[in-house]
Amino acid sequence: MKRIKIIVSFIALIFVSSTAISQNGKVVLNTNDVPEDTHVHLDDFPKDMVIPMIHGWGGMTVDINNTPKGTNFSPLLEGLENDLCQVPHWGYVIEGAIEIEYDDGNKETFKKGEAFYMKPGHTGIVLEDLLLVSFSPEEGMHHLGEHLEKKMKEMQEAQSSND
């Protein structure tokens, strides 16, 4: 019950806020832009994406990261600025753990039951099978999602040609 209260409070904090600032200083959250679907079940997220996400939540994107232990995100981020994700994320770890490394060399570990803020300029390695939900500025997530899909396709094609 306590975990549910924390999750609800955390989500409410995000959406009650009238503005959020992206890495380039633009206002990206519009709380008057109400999504058609105001709630979604984990099973309803797209199944054909590297990181399943739903855009259009008042300028935010909600995503579900369900990733196995040992996954290193660095290869997928190659080609982005400094080869790192430049999108900030706010979220909650439902299961597992992930180590985040920032462009300044600092590291943090987010574990089951923790709400987090992941600042721009990061990569990560999954320490334990991971299930997390995060909210991020929609503007940056469109670009990130396209990049991840392109990198995954390139990696799959390279693997196929090596077989």
Image (tube, rainbow, N blue to C red):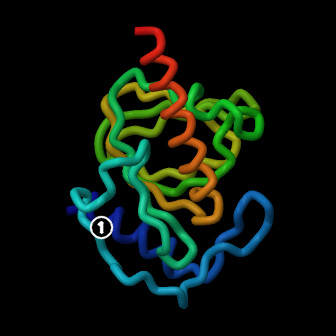
Q: Which percent across, then down, holds residue 88?
A: 62, 54
Which residue is farthest right?
25
Closer to the camera in the image, 124 or 99: 124
Task: Using the rendered view, name the quadrant where residue 45 is placed.
Answer: bottom left
What quarter of the picture does the N terminus occupy? bottom left
> For the point 60% across and 82% down, which residue is it?
30
Left or right: 56 with respect to 21?
A: left
Q: Is residue 109 above or below residue 3?
A: above
Asked if residue 80 is positioned above or below residue 13 in the image, the reply reads above
Q: Can residue 2 be seen in this view?
A: no
Q: Is mark 1 on a helix, strand or loop?
A: helix
Q: Name the residue under label 1.
A: 5
Task: Decide if residue 68 is on the left or right side of residue 149.
Answer: left
Residue 144, percent from left and from top:
60, 49
Task: Identify the image quadrant of the C terminus.
Answer: top left
Q: Residue at x 64, y 58 (%)?
A: 140
Residue 85 at least partly seen = yes
The foreground one among 21 and 80 is 80
The quarter of the picture where residue 6 lies is bottom left
User: Residue at coordinates 54% horizontally, 90% vertically from top-left?
Assistant: 32
Q: In this view, does 105 lie above or below 60?
A: above
- Residue 112 position within the rendered picture, expressed as x and y whole percent measured from the top left: 33, 42
The amino acid type of the residue labelled 1 equals: Lys
Question: Percent from the top left, x then y, of residue 78?
Answer: 66, 30
Position of residue 52 in the picture relative to residue 39 (left or right): right
From the viewer's perspective, tell me whether residue 89 is left or right of residue 57.
right
Give above or below for 115 relative to 106: below
